[in-house]
Amino acid sequence: MSSPTTNATEIASMLAQALGTTRDDNNPHAVRIEESDGTTRVQALVPSSLSEPDRLKLLAGILQTGLSFGQRVQSGGESVLWVEIDHTDSKDGGRP
């Protein structure tokens, strides 16, 4: 079973590769991992230029994790995609 940190790192790597960016917790335009009490959130800015097939492939990968996720669409067509790992759900970081 993976820890929340391991899950977050794997998801961040998947997002960075799919979006052609890097992971940098201090850069709002990069993939970031944010820790808070009981949760770990992975966030990424999704450019409006990302093709529909690539967008669907990205969402399919996130769905396979079984974790909570969402997408906030911003003005200009960009969006912020997030995946949240609840540390209290189970030993494997929230996976059912």
Image (cartoon, rainbow, N blue to C red):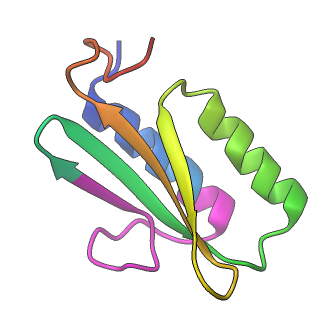
**Snapshot quadrant of residue 50:** bottom right
User: Where is residue 86 shown, x and y percent of the image?
Assistant: 28, 30
Instruction: Please report the bounds of the magenta region as a residue range.
Output: 16-34
Identify whether 49 is placed above or below 81. Answer: below
- In the displayed structure image, the side of residue 41 where residue 22 appears, left or right: right
Q: How many marks?
A: 0
Outermost residue, left side:
37
Q: Is residue 20 magenta?
A: yes
Query: Could you tell me which quadrant the N terminus lies in?
Result: top left
Where in the figure is residue 30, as x and y percent of width and height?
45, 73
Main SS of residues in magenta: loop
Residue 52 sits inside the magenta stretch: no
Q: Quarter of the image containing the C terminus?
A: top left
Task: Say which quarter of the image contains residue 8.
Answer: top left
Q: Position of residue 4 (x, y in %)?
A: 28, 31
Query: Looking at the picture, how far across and down is residue 77, in whole percent?
Result: 70, 80
Q: Residue at x 59, y 70 (%)?
A: 79
Say if 58 sits above or below 54 in the image: above
At 27% from the left and 37% from the top, the residue drawn is 5
Quick check: 16 above or below 87?
below
Q: Residue at x 80, y 49 (%)?
A: 56
Residue at image x 49%, y 64%?
44
Residue lying farthest to the bottom in this orientation: 76
